[in-house]
Image (cartoon, grey):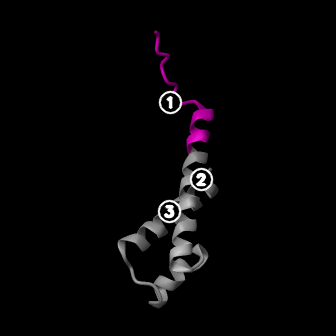
């Protein structure tokens, strides 16, 4: 069996990976929103106002949110 070399510069492969990551991150956001009963659009304001504590899980939520924003707007 011959293994074909992987073309890491393939635009299709990069886009597939970007889409997969976006799906996974959006799922994570939905889980946090359900757990905290708070929209991701309001999480940073809730942190700033003290309504939400700065825990590792909340930081993970913010990182996921900012990553989605970067992947979506930074194409």
Could you tell me how far apart the alpha carbons at marks 2 and 3 are, in whole angstroms?
Answer: 11 Å
Residue 8 located within the stretch drawn in magenta: yes
Q: Is residue 50 above or below residue 44?
A: below
Nearest to N terminus: mark 1 or mark 3: 1
Residue 43 percent across, percent down from the top left: 53, 78
Q: How crowded is mark 3: few (under 14 residues within 10 Å), some or many (20 or more)?
A: many
Residue 37: quarter of image: bottom right
Helix, strand or loop for disc 1: loop
**Residue labelled with disc 2:** 23
Mark 2 or 3: the one toward you: 2
Q: Which disc is residue 8 wearing?
A: 1
Relative vertical location of residue 56 with respect to residue 28 in this rendering, above or below: below
* Label 2 – label 1 distance at C-alpha: 21 Å
Q: What stretch is highlighted in magenta?
A: 1-17
Q: Residue at x 52, y 25 (%)?
A: 7
Between circles 1 and 3, the one closer to the viewer is 3
Classify residue 58 as left or right of residue 45: left
Inspect the magenta stretch and tell me whether residue 15 lies in it. Answer: yes
Horizontal and vertical percent position of residue 13: 58, 34
Disc 2 to disc 3: CB gap under 8 Å: no
Mark 3 lies on residue: 64
Earlier residue among tags 2 and 3: 2
> Relative to 24, is 11 above or below?
above
Q: Which of 36 and 9 is in front in this view?
A: 36
Packing grade of label 2 (10 A; few <14, some 14-19, many >=20) is: few
Q: Where is residue 58 in the image (x, y as percent from the top left)?
A: 43, 73
């Amino acid at each position: 069996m011959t293994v074909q070399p992987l073309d890491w510069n393939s635009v299709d492969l990069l886009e597939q990976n970007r889409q997969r990551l976006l799906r996974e991150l959006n799922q994570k956001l939905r889980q946090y929103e359900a757990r905290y009963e708070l929209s991701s659009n309001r999480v940073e304001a809730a942190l700033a106002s003290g309504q939400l504590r700065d825990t590792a899980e909340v930081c993970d939520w913010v990182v996921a949110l900012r990553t989605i924003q970067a992947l979506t707007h930074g194409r």
